């Protein structure tokens, strides 16, 4: 009887000590998942998801309060990566590809105010004061920040034109003759 | 020679008799040619002529740009009338940058150089000349030939395989070329073999072309080139399959023939190489089979690149029956086009006008899991499973089943008793994967840009603060110095014999000093010096 109590007490004390030490040694600062999710998100801090920047969105995703399809500039690629990271199933059919919109400048009404140039999170706009600005198509994430600040509505998000390089076969439609 | 067996494959009705006995004829010079700048895999060529320029036949009009690209030459002499977009010979019907050339009817060549012994050239020189001649793979893949030569020369070639398979139904352009120009083809083959130092050279020809086999066997007599007769089967003319049949080696998934010491070129490419090296003629024309049930007089034509398809059809007597489908290339892997105004390009092996009976349009019905497609797949995939996953938009499952190894030959769609458009599913999925890949690359690039911008903004802010702090410190130091000087001054003033009460602050001390009637020069000088130092 006493042996049993003693041995269990000793065991409990030792294991408790180990747990206590482990809790101190392997302590984790914050949720590591949030950092991983931030890595997946585009990092343009555009705020289109309704959260303050990508870190805020990652926090919400980690808590499960936001859907994985929340990021418009990231498009389907990001949604799939987020779903894989969080281990959730989602319907991606409604998610547009990231490259479906792109900023375009109407040169005849651009006044060269440099406002869009200053807010672009990916440096996709080239310009200087009193000079017509231009968009680097490869760098534009269609975050829409430039559209909001343009005083003349010269810069607008436009659908990307399909070219011979980007053309793809459509999905076969059930019930359609081949 | 012992042949190896091939997994899968189908035996579609050849229908080559329609055009196989028609000798190669030239199409009359078209009045206007549309020469697309993208007729090859890789980057489009860059035009080196301007609107209004007069060009000679064979003159360079667009140069290769970047690592994978090909040069383009004027198919005939004439005037450049436009540099702009024109409909591409492609299923999408989208425009492609094109040079429009009005022929002057003279067909005048640029100065070309004929070599008596092309084997005097170095291996590198041959590859360079093949590149300068704008030669691409004429079997349909249109990969720049010079690149393949250079890659293979560096990695070493055990077996050079010349593809005379022509397994697509209807097409007879390679058959006719081998029958009529076997000597030139063999010289081209020997030039390629010399350029890559190939140890063994095999020409694979399907047994449904007995005349071509005979002509080639006669032409190779006395050379190291061997003609191998292969059984007729689709897709025998595919690069991976012809290697497997002739050598028994299989290219690893995602690999290239060069990985296992192989190099495959088409017979038409060998002919183009011979023309370029011996006569200095760039690739300006190719043999095109015009056939199909709707064509009045099916034929084989030598056509200048840029000739509108319409002119070929008219030359072949126009349509005898209503056309259900117009196809560029073969019926299995060709491109369906919506109208005949598109130009012939380097990769156009055939123009087929098919009737409704030939296309056999049928509504797809549900999969009955008969696995006929599995038996037909030459790569050994499970088309029915892959298509089911793709239909459910589960691309990763399809990739796990080997979607990336699919060669899009269409054998599965051809045999499917339920008429399920299997290869269409795979083409769709491959496009989707490519798009996802592109999205990922773009995301990585834009993320880097966003991070760099954030870092830059922080750095600028930090530098601004540092500069401000430095300025503040300097100002404070100056103030301190000034205060010290003023204190010293006030001491000096206090020591002077003044009538007024002693000033309290430094400023008042200076004023007092200025206003006082001090005659002691030394004190004044000392004060001036101190002020100067402080300033």
Image (cartoon, rainbow, N blue to C red):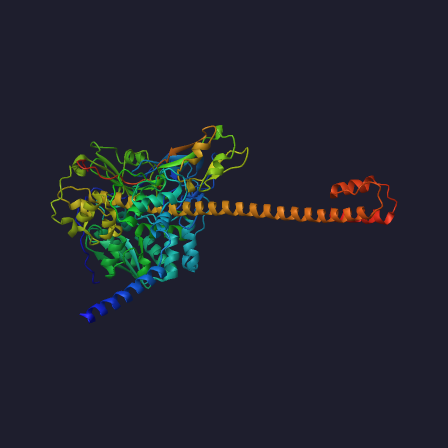
Q: Position of residue B71 (x, y in %)?
A: 42, 46
Which of the two residues, B60 or B276, is positioned nearer the viewer here?
B60
Count numbered badges in the picture: 0
Residue at image x 28%, y 51%?
B178
Indicate whether B405 appears above or below B312: below
Q: Residue furthest bottom?
A: A3
Relative to B86, residue B474 above or below: below
Residue B9 lies left or right of residue B271; in this view the side is left
| Quadrant for the C terminus of chain A in the image | top left
Residue B253 placement (x, y as % from top left):
27, 56
The answer to whether residue B359 shows anywhere in this view is yes
Query: B513 and B300: which one is in front?
Result: B513
The residue positioned 25% from the left and 33% from the top of the image is B318
Q: Quadrant of residue B123?
A: bottom left
Image quarter of the N terminus of chain A: bottom left
Where residue A80 appears, x then y in whole percent? Answer: 29, 45
* Towards the viewer: A44 or B294: A44
Q: Nearer the viewer, residue B243 or A46?
A: A46
Q: Tell me residue A175's x, y (percent).
A: 17, 36
């Amino acid at each position: 009887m006493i042996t049993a109590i003693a041995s269990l007490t000793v065991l409990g004390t030792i294991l408790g000590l180990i747990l206590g030490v482990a809790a101190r040694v392997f302590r984790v600062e914050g949720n590591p998942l949030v950092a991983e999710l931030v890595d997946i998100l585009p990092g343009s801090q555009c705020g289109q998801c309704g959260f303050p920047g990508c870190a805020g969105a990652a926090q919400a995703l980690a808590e499960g309060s936001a859907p994985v399809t929340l990021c418009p500039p990231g498009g389907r690629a990001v949604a799939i990566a987020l779903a894989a990271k969080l281990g959730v199933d989602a319907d991606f059919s409604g998610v547009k590809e990231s490259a479906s919109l792109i900023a375009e400048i109407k040169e005849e009404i651009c006044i060269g105010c440099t406002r869009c140039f200053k807010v672009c999170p990916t440096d996709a706009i080239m310009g200087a004061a009193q000079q017509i600005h231009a968009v680097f198509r490869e760098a534009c994430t269609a975050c829409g920040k430039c559209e909001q600040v343009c005083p003349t509505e010269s810069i607008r998000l436009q659908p990307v034109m399909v070219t011979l390089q980007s053309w793809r076969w459509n999905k076969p439609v059930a019930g359609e003759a081949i | 020679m012992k042949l190896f067996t091939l997994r899968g494959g189908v035996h579609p009705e050849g229908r080559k008799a329609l055009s196989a006995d028609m000798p190669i004829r030239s199409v009359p010079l078209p009045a206007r040619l549309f020469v697309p700048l993208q007729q090859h895999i890789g980057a489009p060529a860059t035009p080196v002529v301007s609107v209004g320029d007069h060009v000679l036949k064979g003159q360079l009009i667009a140069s290769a740009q970047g690592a994978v690209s090909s040069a383009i030459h004027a198919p005939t002499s004439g005037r450049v009338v436009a540099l702009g977009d024109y409909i591409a010979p492609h299923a999408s019907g989208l425009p492609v940058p094109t040079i429009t050339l009005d022929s002057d009817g003279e067909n005048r060549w640029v100065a070309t150089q004929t070599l008596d012994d092309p084997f005097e050239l170095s291996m590198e020189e041959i590859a360079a000349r093949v590149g300068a001649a704008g030669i691409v793979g004429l079997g349909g893949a249109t990969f720049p030939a010079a690149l393949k030569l250079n890659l293979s020369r560096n990695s070493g070639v055990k077996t050079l395989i010349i593809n005379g398979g022509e397994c697509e139904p209807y097409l007879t352009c390679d058959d006719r070329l081998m029958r009529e120009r076997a000597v030139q083809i063999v010289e081209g083959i020997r030039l390629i073999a010399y350029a890559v130092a190939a140890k063994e050279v095999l020409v694979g020809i399907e047994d449904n072309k007995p005349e071509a086999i005979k002509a080639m066997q006669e032409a190779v007599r006395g050379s190291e080139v061997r003609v191998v007769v292969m059984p007729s089967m689709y897709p025998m003319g595919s690069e991976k399959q012809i290697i497997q049949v002739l050598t028994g080696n299989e290219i690893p998934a995602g690999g290239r023939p060069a990985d296992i010491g192989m190099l495959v070129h088409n017979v038409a490419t060998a002919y183009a190489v011979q023309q370029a090296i011996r006569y200095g003629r760039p690739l300006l024309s190719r043999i095109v089979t015009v056939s199909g049930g709707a064509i009045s007089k099916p034929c084989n034509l030598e056509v200048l690149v840029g000739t509108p398809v319409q002119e070929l059809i008219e030359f072949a007597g126009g349509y005898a029956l209503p056309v259900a489908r117009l196809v560029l290339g073969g019926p299995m892997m060709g491109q369906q086009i919506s109208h005949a105004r598109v130009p012939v390009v380097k990769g156009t092996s055939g123009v087929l006008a098919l009737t409704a009976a030939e296309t056999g349009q049928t509504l797809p019905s549900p999969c009955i899991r008969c696995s006929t497609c599995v038996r037909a797949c030459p790569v050994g995939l499970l088309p029915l499973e892959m298509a089911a996953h793709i239909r459910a938009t589960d691309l990763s499952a399809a990739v796990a089943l080997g979607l990336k190894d699919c060669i899009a030959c269409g054998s599965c769609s051809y045999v499917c008793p339920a008429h399920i458009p299997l290869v269409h599913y795979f083409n769709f999925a491959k496009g989707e994967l490519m798009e996802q890949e592109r999205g990922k690359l773009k995301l990585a690039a834009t993320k880097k840009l966003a991070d760099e911008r954030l870092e830059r903004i922080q750095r600028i802010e930090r530098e601004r603060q540092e500069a401000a702090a430095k300025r503040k410190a300097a100002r404070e130091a100056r103030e301190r110095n000034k205060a010290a000087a003023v204190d010293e001054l006030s001491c000096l003033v206090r020591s002077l014999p003044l009538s007024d009460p002693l000033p309290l602050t430094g400023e008042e001390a200076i004023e007092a000093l200025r206003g006082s009637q001090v005659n002691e020069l030394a004190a004044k000088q000392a004060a001036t010096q101190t002020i100067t130092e402080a300033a």
